[in-house]
Amino acid sequence: MNNDGTCPTCDEQVVEAREHAGSDVAQDEKAPWHFKLMIVALALYLLWRLVAVFV
């Protein structure tokens, strides 16, 4: 996509230029709650496996 929000091949307006100007990801996007839950579950699982090695 060009800096002005147009398609490089057909020059059609794809998004508003000021919406994504100068950044690949919007600044206010956050990780979804289920991703955070998955990370916590993974950490607990790995901790449990670590404890099981020494018991």
Image (tube, rainbow, N blue to C red):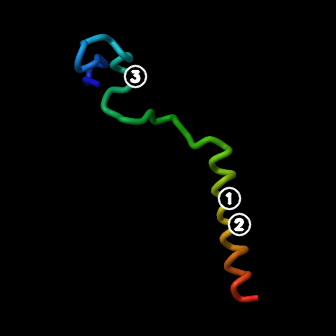
* Quarter that holds the N terminus: top left
Residue 31 in the image, given as x and y percentages of width and height: 57, 43
Mark 1 vs mark 3: give the one in front.
1
Q: Is mark 1 on a helix, strand or loop?
A: helix
Give the amino acid type for the residue marked by disc 1 in the picture.
Val
Mark 1 closeness class: few <14, some 14–19, many ≥20 residues within 10 Å: few
Using the image, tell me which numbered label, if any, was put on residue 19.
Answer: 3
Query: Does residue 32 appear to the left or right of 8 in the view shown?
Result: right
Q: Is mark 2 on a helix, strand or loop?
A: helix
Residue ID at (25%, 12%): 11
- As measured in the structure, the alpha-carbon distance from the residue carrying label 3 to the one carrying label 2 is 39 Å
Residue 17 in the image, given as x and y percentages of width and height: 33, 19
Residue 24 in the image, given as x and y percentages of width and height: 36, 35
Q: Is mark 3 on a helix, strand or loop?
A: helix
Give the amino acid type for the residue marked by disc 2 in the picture.
Leu
Mark 3 closeness class: few <14, some 14–19, many ≥20 residues within 10 Å: few
- As measured in the structure, the alpha-carbon distance from the residue carrying label 1 to the one carrying label 2 is 6 Å
